[in-house]
């Protein structure tokens, strides 16, 4: 646009002095306003949410606001590395990550712009967002949660055998436990929460018990752990709830058959509650469209988007007072469950300590 108007201005320069003056004034205004106009309806998102069902939320936001979304998809680690490399030149406005520890790490590294939003603060519980910064702003907000649940072979074990995370270290599960890599963010955050509940020493003893009970070396994703229990390779396994719900709702009969062979438990309902991790969002430190970024995060905390997290991707809503109608989630819990209330930021802070403990006990 700038080049076109410079060309028009050069044509007008051949006219009268008065016309030339008017044209120069118009050109100056356009050069000042055009970049703002170009930014007004754009939002650049770096997202670790690789779920096709999210496309509906993006399109609904654009329809409601007229703001066009440009998106780069990568995993959490890749996004954070890119932000660091790009620095102030980064085009990113919104960052969407799927783990509390990574959100905390990015905040510590100064990659987020703390924002003030009454809508977000009213909607999202304090333990599911960052602690307020010195200026009163908040660096990141949890937007949905995933429960870390236990699945078990209904022939070999009963629900009471696995109704707490601590019981997974019991010798009765020798050679029975399946779990993904200890270095995966889901497990780092889970053990980070256990460290808050049990303390470092007891947590490390518990971790050693888990390693002693493993049916095989950690491998695969959470879905593989579920299938391992159904096939008889494992007696118990740990998974995020949305993987199980996805299989329960699958159009593939084989997936549904897997879920019928296993039981599911939301552990620690009699004390601190089941561990939940979050998928969250933040405004990038060098956002060029910060106002649009805040609007988008506020939209993700709205009832319509929160319902989509539940019904589209089988996650638990975080916003207060939001109901949902996901048959798989309701079947797993009967409608609700007790989740732990420790600050998610504390879980992130334990990440380095937890990785060192896992290394010491041989949790690969």
Image: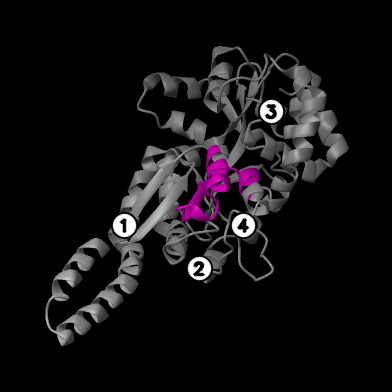
Image height of 346 relative to 248, above or below:
below
Q: Secondary structure at mark 2?
A: helix
* Disc 1 + disc 3, Cβ < 8 Å: no
Sequence-earlier tag: 4 or 1? 1
Identify the image quadrant of the C terminus. Answer: top right
Give the residue at mark 3.
182
Residue 93 in the magenta stretch? The answer is yes
Q: Position of residue 16 (x, y in %)?
A: 13, 84
Q: Which residues are magenta?
A: 78-103
Mark found first going from the N terminus, 4 or 2: 2
- Residue drawn at x 76%, y 15% as measured from the top left: 174
Q: Which residue is mark 1?
A: 62
- Mark 4, residues whose alpha carbon is within 10 Å: few (<14), some, or many (≥20)? many
Tell me where residue 72 appears, x and y as whole percent: 42, 43
* Mark 4 to mark 1 CA distance (whole Å): 25 Å
Q: Which residue position is annotated with label 2?
A: 119
Mark 1 or mark 2: which comes first in sequence?
1
Q: Quadrant of residue 30?
A: bottom left
For residue 266, above or below residue 284: above
Specify the color scheme. one colour
146 sits to left or right of 200: left
- How packed mark 2 is, by other alpha carbons closer than 10 Å (few <14, some 14-19, many 20 or more), is some
- Look at mark 4 in the image and give the residue it sits on: 129
Looking at marks 4 and 3 on the same chain, the residue that comes earlier in the sequence is marked by 4
Distance in Å between CA atoms under marks 1 and 3 = 39 Å
In what element is the residue under mark 4? Answer: loop
Question: Would residue 353 be visible to someone looking at this image?
Answer: yes
């Amino acid at each position: 646009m700038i080049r076109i108007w410079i060309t028009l201005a050069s044509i007008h320069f051949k006219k009268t002095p008065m016309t030339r003056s008017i044209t120069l004034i118009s050109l100056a205004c356009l050069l000042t306003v055009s970049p703002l106009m170009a930014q007004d309806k754009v939002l650049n998102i770096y997202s670790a949410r690789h779920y096709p069902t999210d496309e509906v939320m993006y399109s609904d936001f654009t329809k409601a606001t007229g703001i066009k979304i440009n998106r780069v998809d990568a995993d959490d680690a890749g996004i954070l590395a890119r932000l660091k490399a790009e620095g102030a030149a980064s085009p990113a406005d919104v960052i969407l990550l799927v783990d509390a520890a990574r959100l905390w790490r990015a905040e510590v590294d100064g990659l987020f712009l703390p924002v003030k939003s009454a809508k977000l603060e009213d909607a999202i519980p304090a333990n599911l967002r960052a602690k307020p910064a010195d200026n009163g702003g908040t660096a990141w907000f949890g937007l949905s949660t995933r429960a870390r649940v236990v699945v078990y072979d209904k022939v070999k074990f009963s629900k009471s055998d696995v109704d707490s995370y601590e019981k997974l270290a019991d010798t009765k599960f020798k050679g029975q436990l399946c779990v993904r890599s200890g270095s995966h963010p889901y497990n780092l955050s889970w053990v980070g929460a256990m460290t808050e509940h049990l303390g470092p020493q007891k947590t490390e003893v518990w971790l050693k018990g888990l390693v002693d009970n493993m049916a095989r070396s950690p491998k695969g994703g959470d879905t593989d752990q579920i299938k391992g229990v159904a096939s008889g390779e494992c007696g118990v396994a740990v998974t995020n709830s949305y993987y199980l719900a996805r299989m329960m709702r699958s159009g593939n009969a084989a997936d549904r058959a897997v879920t019928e062979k296993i039981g599911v438990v939301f552990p620690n309902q009699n004390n601190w509650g089941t561990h939940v991790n979050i998928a969250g969002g933040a405004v990038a430190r060098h956002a060029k469209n910060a106002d649009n970024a805040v609007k988008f995060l506020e939209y993700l905390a709205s009832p319509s988007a929160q319902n989509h997290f539940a019904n589209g991707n089988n996650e638990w809503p975080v916003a207060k007072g939001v109901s949902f109608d996901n048959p798989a989630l309701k079947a797993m819990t009967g409608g609700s469950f007790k989740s732990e209330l420790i600050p998610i930021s504390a879980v992130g802070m334990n990440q380095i300590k937890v990785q060192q403990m896992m290394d010491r006990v041989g949790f690969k």
